[in-house]
Image (spheres, helix red, strand yellow):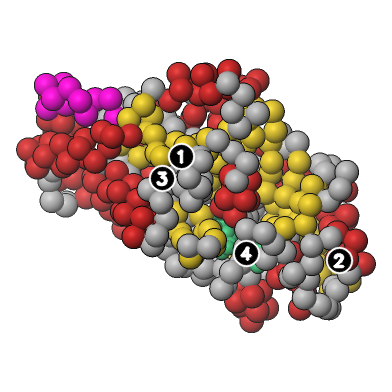
Amino acid sequence: MVRAIVGANWGDEGKGKITDMLGEQSDIIIRFQGGSNAGHTIINEYGKFSLHMLPSGVFYQHTTSIIGNGVALNIPFLQKEIDEIVSKGVPRPHILVSDRAQILMPYHMEFDAYEEERLGGKAFGSTKSGIAPFYSDKYAKIGFQVSELFDDEILKEKVERVAEQKNIILEHMYHKPLINPNALLETLHVYRDIVEPYVCDVAQYLRKAIKEGKNILLEGQLGTLKDPDFGIYPMVTSSSTLAAYGAIGAGLAPYEIDNITCVVKAYSSAVGAGEFVTEILDEEEAEELRKRGGDGGEYGATTGRPRRMGWFDCVASRYGVQMQGATEVVFTVLDVLGYLDEIPVCVGYEIDGEVTKDFPVTAKLKKAKPVYEKLPGWKSDISGITKYEDLPENCRKYIEFVEKELGVPIKMVSNGPGRHEIIVREA
Ligand code: GDP
């Protein structure tokens, strides 16, 4: 069985918790896109962890954690995270890294920062993790595959060739220090020694695992609205965030993905710049939700930046689950909304005087104004509740309203950050 866990919105929907939870029944967990630019927060018996590179399965001894070919592999981060979890008492995880994954180079992070600096007020709000320069190089065919670390002659020639090209830009466009090819080659030797024990032909490994009937989880990062094709371009990430890409970024046949679990958050939050129709513009009102949100407030797992807050957006979320091809929804952080008398929910966008329920392209999205419906709040703490029927009536009404709007069954409701704080709805 192959299941993908992906986000419907801007990311931070709580996918880490759901992956960690469903990881219990999985043999293999794979990251298939993105890099260390977003983090998953996981709370379990070992403590609280913020993972950027490692899949969320690393806490179980029975699972194999894989970094797929679609990922931007930051090797120093990989090592740091392995060392950190081991130092906190987690048994050394079984990790595999695709021999076809490409390496996030030190200069990718630098180029990311330089470009944001150059753009000034027009910056993308990048996390400066080097993701856009990394994927640019991958598709410009000047990226470095893990497999290339093991052929020193080819590596040396390529380092010199790429450094020459990068140095022209560094010198003339950014006026920054140049890359020393010898030093870069040495760094890559260090990377090679770190990654060597984990390198694997992942596609072949997965083919065998599928034949053996193993349970496989594909772990997505960010969400539909950050997808470079279907998101709020150009304020998107640089690799596809869609479940469909799970097949490519892991090395599976597309028809092997049986279940697409889409994580949808009970309100909205976003990091970085970009269109956000239901954003709460009153700073006091936004801060009230922000400080109650997630676990310890809505602040970026990678950057610590305060997230932008908004009300639930049916238009964006329905589009989000549709583009993911969701077979089921997990509705998260619902416990956070227990303080509100009334909860605004966006049911349409008004664009040029017309109301639409379809999520538009970015140029139109810029003009969209939210059309709200107000649902009654439940004014109580729902954390600790384990049965759907035990939720307050208005809370169930909120869930069922959203479910109808999404058009996909909400199979689970998450009412707290912990692994077992989940309500499974009976069919
Ligand atoms: P991800 O990138 O999608 O995994 O999202 P994050 O790691 O940013 O998760 C969002 C935050 O919400 C984390 O701090 C989680 O511990 C927390 N969280 C996840 N599910 C719930 C929930 O149902 N209720 C509450 N209160 N917090 C949750």
Q: How crowded is mark 3: few (under 14 residues within 10 Å), some or many (20 or more)?
A: some
Place of residue 424 in the rendered image (x, y in percent of width and height, measured from the top left): 79, 52
Observer-nearest of 292 and 275:
292
Provide the residue designation for mark 1. 65
Contact between labelled residues 3 and 1, with CB atoms less than 8 Å apart: yes
Q: Which of marks 1 and 3 is in front?
A: 3
Q: Earlier in the sequence, mark 4 or mark 3?
A: 3
* Amino acid at circle 2: Leu
Among the two numbered marks 2 and 3 on one chain, the one whose residue lies closer to the N terminus: 3
Q: Do the residues labelled 2 and 3 touch (CB within 8 Å)?
A: no
Question: In this figure, which residue is indicated by the disc labeled 3?
Answer: 93
Q: What stretch is highlighted in magenta?
A: 146-156
Quadrant holding the C terminus: top right
Task: Indicate yes or no: mark 3 CB to ligand 1 under 8 Å.
Answer: no
Labelled pair 2, 4 in contact (Cβ < 8 Å) = no
Real-space Cα separation, disc 1 to disc 3, in angstroms = 7 Å
* Mark 4 lies within 8 Å of ligand 1 (Cβ measured): yes
| Residue under numbered circle 4 | 417
Q: Mark 2 points at which residue?
A: 391
Q: Which residue is drawn at 72% across and 37% down?
A: 326
Tag on residue 199? none
Q: Distance between the residues labelled 2 and 1?
A: 35 Å
Q: Does the magenta stretch include residue 147?
A: yes
Whether residue 103 is in magenta: the answer is no
